[in-house]
Every structure is written in C-alpha cells, then in structure tokens.
C-alpha cells in the first residue's frame, strides 16, 4: 500500500471523465488499497481515483469519525445512481482537492446506487444522510465534476481564481533563457 499525492484545483486532470473498470481484479483492489491509505492520511471521508490521477471509476469511503474507532471502509467500482429523491438535503462540503474551502451544497437526500464491491459482487444500496452526500460528491469526481460546480457562478469563479493564484505562487520559477542573461549582462 502507498500514500499517493492528491491532485488539487486547478489541475485539469480533475476534469477528466473516468472509465469503467468492468471487473474488480487484483489490480483494482491494489488501487483501492492505495486510495484508502491516501484518504486516511489526508485525512478525509472519501476519495475518487481521479484525485490521485487515475481515471478509473473507483472510489472509497469511510465515515467512521474518530481515529480509535473501528474503521468501516467501503469500496465502490463503476457506481451508477439509479434513483434520486426529490427531497434535498444541505451539507457543508469540503474536498481534498480544494483544501480548506467549505461551502453548503444541496443534493438529493436519498439515492439508490448500483456498483461492484471489492469482491467484484454487483450490489445495490439505498442511502441517505452523510453517506448519500459523500457518494454523490465522489461520483461527481468520476464525471469530472467538483462540488464548487454546484455553487453560484460568483462563488465558483472566486474559488477557482484563489486556487489558480496559489498554484502560480507555488510554481517553481521559470528557468531564465540565455537571451535574458545576455541582456542583463
Ligand atoms: O472527495 C473528497 O475530496 C473527500 C471529501 C469528501 C466529502 C466531504 C464532505 C462532504 C462530501 C464529501 C473529504 O473527505 S473533505 C474532508 C472531510 O470532510 C473530513 C476530514 C477529516 C475528518 C472528517 C471529515
Ligand atoms: Zn472531492
């Protein structure tokens, strides 16, 4: 198992649409293990494969709160939302790819989801509460969507600008070409 770097806004790979895996084999299980370790280390309650740069429709979730609490990891491959409730619920969401930025998002309160589990068994679950919110947030990642896409245009553009600026400031300085040195010398 390995902790992998998490991509952050404005990395364009976060906008990729991920591909179905079809079968959960040892390679997909190894990816799930790396994702789980990366999510626990962050820490977070969910992670989609594209957040570590892998464009496969795989996600992990663990909503257990305390470090000493027994871990309850959930593994999903090729998830599909079959039904969404009309009723919505609002939750203040965060995202490991948009660090230290939180906003309220409204989503369907209940969803029915079909997926492949870690043992390649096809399953269907109906979920509500934080699990419904987190699953929808992670499935959005698989479609290249971020939670800021659910906000007003003003809030979304402000957030994107903030992270673009941070990325520019953290970027290594461009190497100076000989013509610049010649002009200076
Ligand atoms: O997908 C991600 O970026 C992970 C994200 C999941 C999520 C959080 C809240 C609502 C919907 C989806 C996170 O885990 S952000 C971090 C977080 O919520 C958290 C971190 C430590 C302890 C408890 C929660
Ligand atoms: Zn996220």
Image (tube, rainbow, N blue to C red):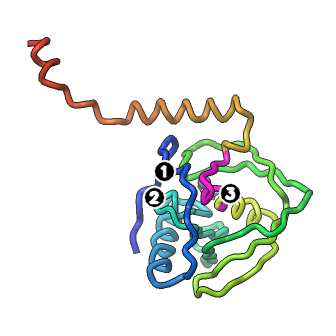
The secondary structure type at the circle numbered 3 is helix
**Disc 3 C-beta below 8 A from ligand 1:** yes
**Residue 129 screen position, x and y as percent:** 80, 64
Region of the chain picked out in magenta, as a range: 139-147
Above or below, comparing residue 135 to residue 185 in the picture: below
Above or below, comparing residue 126 to residue 146 in the picture: below
Q: Residue at x 87, y 54 (%)?
A: 88
Between discs 1 and 2, the one toward the N terminus? 1
Q: Which residue is mark 3?
A: 137
Q: Which mark is residue 101?
A: none
Corner quadrant of residue 18 = bottom right
Position of residue 60 in the picture relative to residue 27 (left or right)? right
Q: Please tell me in which quarter of the rendered image ligand 2 is found.
A: bottom right
For the residues labelled 3 and 2, the Cα–Cα distance comes to 17 Å
Above or below, comparing residue 180 to residue 167 in the picture: above
**Residue 175 screen position, x and y as percent:** 21, 31
Position of residue 181 in the picture relative to residue 162 (left or right)? left
Q: Quadrant of the C terminus?
A: top left
């Amino acid at each position: 198992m390995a902790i992998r770097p998490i991509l952050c806004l404005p990395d364009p790979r976060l906008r990729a649409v991920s591909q179905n895996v079809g079968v959960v084999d040892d390679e997909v299980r190894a990816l799930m293990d790396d994702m789980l370790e990366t999510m626990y280390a962050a820490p977070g309650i969910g992670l989609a494969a594209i957040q570590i740069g892998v464009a496969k429709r795989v996600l992990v979730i663990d909503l257990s709160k305390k470090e000493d609490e027994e871990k309850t990891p959930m593994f999903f491959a090729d998830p599909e939302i079959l039904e969404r409730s009309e009723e919505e619920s609002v939750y203040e969401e965060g995202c490991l790819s948009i660090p230290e930025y939180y906003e309220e998002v409204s989503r369907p309160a209940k969803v029915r989801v079909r997926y492949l589990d870690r043992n390649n068994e096809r399953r269907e679950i109906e979920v509500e509460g934080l699990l419904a919110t987190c699953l929808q947030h992670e499935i959005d990642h698989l479609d290249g969507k971020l939670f800021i896409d659910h906000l007003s245009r003003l809030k979304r553009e402000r957030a994107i600008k903030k992270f673009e600026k941070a990325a520019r400031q953290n970027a290594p300085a461009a190497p100076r070409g000989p013509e610049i040195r010649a002009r200076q010398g």
